[in-house]
């Protein structure tokens, strides 16, 4: 039966209370996030897990979240990091920087930085410092985190100069001056913009390899980074509870990294070319997931449900926009925006009540307002996708979410940002 686990998977999960009814029935329905949380952690508890928790071989953590509620999960320590390191060491385009022992600097959300600082302070029996030092931000002997502010749009020159100094120190510790840059793509784009604006490019050592993960990478952001860095740039797709599932190659094509996993695709709506990603994984021995709805959406090369033909990851299922023409995903609007102009950096679509115009709020890489022709074309594309009139507004800044990630869609009026250059259409 399509999507049902193999006998080997069933044997691995036979003692987990959550799956007892499905095993007895001989059928596993799609596993939704609320089912994982119901009765947690007792619904996952086995003698082996209890022993692992007592020994420190398993830990309970919260998923990182995006713009939605976080989920409590159980996993081995450093589960996601080990998945990352393995993929880095095996990736055909960047395995060389792993083998060379290149240090890794990580430019991502301040929440990630603060988590590392808290863990290190706990090991010392101390409270974390208000502003963690470089050593406080060291994850292991290879990785150090850089970011100390929630919103990279608000980085000051002193912030940028400090991060560049730390990057130079990391590169200088390698015999050939090489390092690996791990990042959220939008954070790195912010850094490039500010480095260029303040004439600091000569102080920015060029990385030997780049990985962006942690969030959806917009088309224009990926293009912008390729224009500024002459090294392999790899996108990783995964989650806290699953580890990494896919990676991109130099051509941008996604390749599976499904050790201990299988994937199926289900249309999000009848006739839709957007599919929900359903994953069965025994990679995490303490929380194996069977037919788990990850919440991610994909499109395939031919619109089919063949997971071997995934063309792109296009956002979160909870963030789909219902329109007269069917669901619209983050990736749909992003591709339309990128096809009109490469100048747009961040964008957010604000949709209010029925009959109300949608508003596409944009920033640009160069900071200059969109031309009338660009704005008209963007308004036309957004209107085509949403099935409602749309106007375009240029902003100098769009705020980041509390999670340290950007929302592409706002369905209630957001707080005024105060820097709109309205009137563009």
Image (spheres, rainbow, N blue to C red):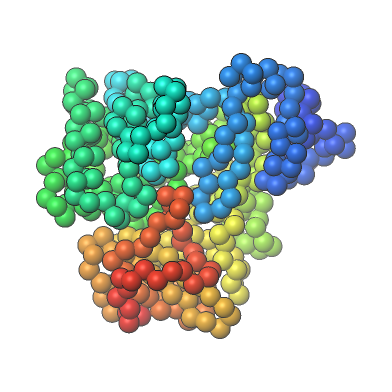
Image position, residue 46 (x, y; %): 75, 23
Residue 90 drawn above or below residue 38: above
Rendered image quadrant of residue 102: top left
Quarter that holds the N terminus: top right
> Can you say whether 420 is above or below 131 in the image?
below
Q: How many marks?
A: 0
Residue at 88%, 33% in the rendered image: 24
Q: Give above or below for 115 relative to 364.
A: above
The one nearer the camera, 323 or 352, is 352
Q: Nearer the viewer, residue 328 or 239?
A: 239
Task: Tell me where residue 265 appears, x and y as whole percent.
Answer: 64, 48
Place residue 387 in its image quadrant.
bottom right
Q: Is residue 46 above or below residue 273?
A: above
Q: Is residue 130 visible?
A: yes
Residue found at the very far right of the displayed protein: 24
Q: Is residue 93 visible?
A: no
Left or right placement of residue 247 versus residue 5 in this view:
left
- Which one is in front, 47 or 355? 47
Considering every residue shown, the one lying at the far front of the view is 126
- Where residue 230 appears, as percent x and y from the top left, is 23, 41
**Quadrant of the frame with the C terminus:** bottom left
Left or right for 38, reference 203: right
Q: Name the residue: 57% across, 25% down.
A: 76
Q: Position of residue 420 (x, y in %)?
A: 32, 73
Tell me which residue sits at (45%, 29%) in the image.
119
Q: What residue is rendered at 51% in x and 40% in y?
A: 238
Please indicate whether residue 158 sits to the left or right of residue 226 in the image: left
């Amino acid at each position: 039966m399509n999507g049902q686990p193999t006998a080997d998977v069933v044997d691995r999960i036979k003692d987990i209370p959550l799956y007892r009814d499905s095993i007895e029935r001989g059928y596993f329905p799609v596993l939704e996030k609320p089912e994982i949380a119901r009765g947690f952690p007792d619904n996952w508890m086995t003698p082996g897990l209890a022993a692992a928790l007592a020994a420190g071989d398993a830990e309970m953590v919260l998923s990182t979240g995006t713009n939605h509620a976080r989920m409590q999960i159980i996993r081995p320590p450093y589960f996601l990091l080990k998945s990352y390191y393995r993929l880095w060491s095996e990736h055909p385009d960047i395995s060389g920087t792993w083998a060379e022992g290149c240090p890794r600097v990580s430019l991502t959300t301040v929440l990630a930085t603060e988590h590392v600082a808290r863990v290190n302070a706990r090991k010392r029996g101390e409270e974390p410092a208000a502003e963690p030092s470089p050593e406080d931000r060291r994850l292991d002997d290879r990785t150090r985190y850089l970011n100390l502010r929630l919103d990279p749009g608000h980085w000051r020159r002193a912030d940028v100069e400090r991060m560049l100094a730390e990057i130079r120190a990391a590169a200088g510790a390698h015999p050939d001056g090489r390092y690996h840059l791990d990042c959220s793509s939008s954070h790195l784009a912010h850094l490039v913009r500010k480095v260029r604006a303040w004439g600091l490019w000569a102080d920015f050592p060029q990385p030997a390899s780049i990985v962006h993960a942690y969030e959806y990478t917009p088309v224009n952001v990926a293009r912008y980074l390729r224009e500024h860095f002459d090294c392999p740039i790899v996108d990783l797709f995964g989650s806290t509870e699953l580890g990494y599932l896919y990676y991109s190659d130099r051509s941008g094509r996604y390749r599976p990294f499904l050790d201990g996993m299988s994937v199926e695709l289900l249309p999000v709506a009848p006739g839709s070319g957007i599919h929900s990603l359903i994953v069965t994984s025994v990679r995490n021995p303490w929380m194996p997931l069977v037919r788990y709805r990850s919440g991610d959406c994909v499109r395939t090369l031919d619109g089919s449900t063949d997971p071997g033909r995934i063309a792109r990851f296009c956002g979160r299922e909870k963030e789909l926009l219902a329109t007269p023409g069917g669901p619209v995903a983050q990736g749909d609007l992003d591709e339309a925006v990128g096809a009109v102009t490469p100048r747009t950096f961040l964008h957010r679509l604000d949709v209010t009540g029925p009959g109300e115009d949608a508003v596409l709020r944009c920033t640009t890489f160069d900071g200059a307002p969109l031309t009338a022709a660009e704005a008209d074309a963007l308004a036309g594309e957004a209107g085509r996708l949403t099935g409602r009139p749309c106007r375009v507004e240029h902003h100098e800044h769009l705020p980041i979410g509390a999670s340290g990630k950007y929302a592409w869609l706002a369905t209630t009026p957001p707080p005024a940002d105060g820097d709109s250059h309205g009137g563009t259409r």
